[in-house]
Image (tube, rainbow, N blue to C red):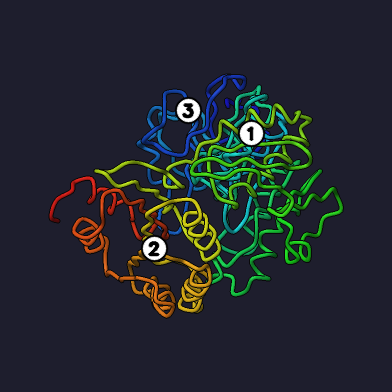
Amino acid sequence: MKFSIEEIIQATNAKIIKNSINNEEKTKISTDTRSLECGDFYLPLKGDNFDGENFLQKADKAIGCFITKDSYPDFMKVVLKVNDTKEAYFQLAQFSRKKVNPKVVHITGSSGKTTTKEMVYSVCSSKFKTTKTFSNHNNEIGFSETTLSMDENCEVLIVETGMRGLGEIALVSKYLNPDIGIITNVGSAHIGRLGSLDNIAKAKCEITSNLKETLIANNSERIKKFANFDGEKIYYSISDAKLIEKRPKYSKFEYKNNIYELNTDGNYNIENSLAAIEVGLKLNMTPEEIKRGLLTYKPIEKRWEEEKVNGYTIINDSYNANPDSMKASVEAFLELYKNPVVILGDMGELGDMEVELHRNVGKFLKDKNIKNVIFLTVGDLAAEIGKELAKSGITVKNFKNNKDVSLYILENINIDTTIFLKASRSMKFEEIIENLRRNKTL
């Protein structure tokens, strides 16, 4: 989206230091000198370990820039001074949201928020001009980036927000002023930072702080406890759907007297899709329109991504992991796939409870009457999962790194096997896939 210089000044209340062009001239905001194009307006972001103002001289293609200090390059035609460039970024996003005035859907949750975002996008984009958060750009900077990427004819804006602590979702909600808020669930992800499930729920429920119309949330007593919102509330869960058919990469179910299909499997994915259906209904879409949109959904990279690798079928769900998503995804995999091998890695950001929470995954899985399944774990924490599984006589081996587990597979696992990968992103399980692709001694 482009702004006139006058609009930039109006949105940020900036002090004009220099202006040698027409105030009506249009320009696009850029925060990175490496991707900056001729005529852009440079907004130098700052963080604990970087200061974008140190790169002003490299912004030689820019028509102008923001500053917080007193120096700037002579080649800048417009120079605007603000106290905080990050706040100016938020203010520009807020201005853009008000100017375009799309229906805004704000999504958060401990797990499933990116999948839900993609499903909501699949539904909405089948009928409306829709913009969504790119990839995992789900912090306050990503919110601004997403909002400023809208075209002026955007009808639906979908913003996903993660969080590292209390106050972050409220900050985004303040500037976003969403029409519809979605909380996918509250689980133990980030419990190391927030200390308790109640604190996590409080943080997620900040999405209601500036919510205008409707909260769509997982039917959880903890969410209900902290969702202080006087508007419409819609709660959903997998128990609201009647399962009709499930097979690998396909689900069919009934919800509110209508039949829907997904080109993916797992009860948790069906549950995520219920939020997308509810958004479609709030936007006055017909069940048929929603159904057509849902059928276009495809899992994104490292989220239940299936591929053939030298005779093995690999299902890569290692984009991220927390105890709840690991339990749900492994359960779904074991229900649907033959000749299974499950590779589990360490989960991060669990704080002082990390050992106990890894053990709980093992306890959950060993109660699922598992037969003829090989479990391989990578990392010291994942080994705790394996210890619990082994107590029930389940075959499990632990490895220190991705190279060792890859060698074991190549030397011991038949190529007609389906291998499931689940771990936090930091475990870099894509290395296992590349090792198998090379199919040689490492």
What amino acid type should be assigned to the residue bearing mark 2?
Val
User: Sequence-wise, which precedes: disc 3 or disc 1?
Assistant: 1
Residue furthest right in the image: 230
What amino acid is labelled 1 in the image? Ile
Q: Which of marks 3 and 2 is nearer the N terminus?
A: 3
Distance of label 1 from label 2 (alpha carbons): 62 Å
Question: Residue at label 1?
Answer: 9
Q: For this view, does 409 lie left or right of residue 59?
A: left
> Which is closer to the viewer, label 3 or label 1?
3
- Callout 1 secondary element: helix
Instruction: Please provide percent x and percent y for residue 60.
Output: 37, 30
The answer to which of marks 1 and 2 sits earlier in the sequence is: 1
Residue 306: x %, y % from top left: 40, 43
Residue depicted at 68% across the width and 64% down the height: 201
- Seen at 71% across and 47% down, the residue is 242
Q: What residue type is labelled 3?
A: Asp
Q: Mark 2 points at which residue?
A: 373
Quarter of the image holding residue 318?
bottom left
